[in-house]
Image (cartoon, rainbow, N blue to C red):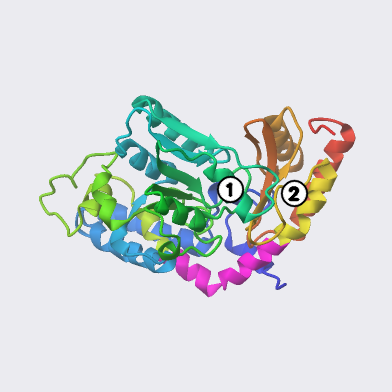
Amino acid sequence: MKDHSALKEQFLLDPSITYLNFGSFGACPRPIFEDYQQWQLLLEREPVQYIAVNSAVNFKRSREALAEYINCDSDDLVYVTNPSYAVNIVAKSLELKEGDEILSTNIEYGALDRTWDYYCKKAKAKYIRQPIELPVTSKEAIIENFWKGYSERTKAIFISQITSSTALILPVKEICEMAKERGLLTIVDGAHVPGHIPLDLATIKADVYTGACHKWMMTPKGCSFLYVKREIQPLFDPLVVSWGYNSAMPSHSQFLDYHQMQGTRDLSAFFTVPRSIAFMKENNWWEVAANCRALVKDNYKRFCDLVGSSPICPVTDEFLGQMCSIPIKTKEPEKLQRHLFEQYQIEVPVMRQDALVFLRYSINAFNTQGDLDKLYDALGAIVKEGKMIEA
């Protein structure tokens, strides 16, 4: 395992904090952040040229770089601020009817559970949170669990490629293939995927895919994308109707016009994607990622043993990337999270998933075994005190 700790100097994170929560909002390395600031400076020096004249060219340059990185056509991508924004575009436009069903899992991101619940209730449709049995034993078991929620009323599936609170890699390629056989629309939340594990949209073949660039791709905050298969792009209206509708200067793509021409906003984060990809190439990022995955796996069972639980999946690359979730018994997850931060200066989430609670650590280039040891010692002290963690 190579030592990539020198990369820590590239990040702007507070050195007094043990940062084990890359998964929530990412963190931007200095070269990418400096690129971001250069774009912002251009905006302030000449706002008219930046927004009205040059934005289309800069969007195209950025989309082309991203499209090459995730293997799709650049005209099938639009930038959005976050995956929640993207899924709202999709859910609002589906024209669900009374009795229709959206099939999902019970381990999806909470904000998107709320999105689907909201739009399904408005249409008198149903959002099906199909239980996935934990611990996961195999890819086949996940697939079998998922399709138990299917019915003749199912219109679309919505599933994460990497889940949030449970940090599991799900077999979305196989599930999308099966959904296509049933004539279903396939919608994948890949918020945690780009820059985390290799992403090939041509292989997954989802109809709709959204991912964040500001997480594992390390761009500034507010940079994500929505991919929609060309044939179904006319189905999706913009959340904000603006200059792209009945455009006086339409481009070759209504999809791009509708979702890209949104009026005055800071586009700078979107334009940093080429620098992000270059940064990862310069630093052999898949080698860095492999190093991080090894650190995640090597420590998973150790933490579970400490708090009296077990891993929720086989400890392999098939199910885990650069983060893992430790089942933990506490009636006060929010209090435990704050205690770890305020008493020990450790940034790590403790999250509810229905009746379950998980402590999720996520690892990137700047993390070391020493960071995980600090978390282990802090949890050990809390367990010994008999506070906040139940046996």
66 left or right, relative to 346:
left
Residue plotted at (32% across, 31% down): 97
Q: Is residue 51 among what the camera can see?
A: no
Return the mark for residue 375. Answer: none
What is the C-alpha distance between the residues marked 2 and 1? Answer: 20 Å
Residue 142, horizontal then vertical, whole percent: 60, 49
Looking at numbered disc 2 in the image, what kind of residue is underneath it? Pro
Reading the image, the residue beneath label 2 is: 311
Q: Residue at x 26, y 45 (%)?
A: 235
Q: Residues within 10 Å of mark 2 (few under 14, many from 20)?
A: some
Residue 352: say if magenta.
Answer: no
Q: Position of residue 225 (x, y in %)?
A: 39, 53
Check disc 2 and report its element: helix, strand or loop: loop
| Residue type beneath disc 1 | Glu
Magenta stretch encompasses residue 289: yes
| Residue 96 visible from this viewpoint | yes
- Side of 265 relative to 196 (left or right): left
Q: Where the C terminus falls, by quadrant?
A: top right
Q: Quadrant of residue 386?
A: top right
Residue 337 place in picture, x, y as percent: 69, 36
Magenta extent: 274-294
Between label 2 and label 1, give the one nearer the viewer. 1
Q: Which residue is mark 1?
A: 144
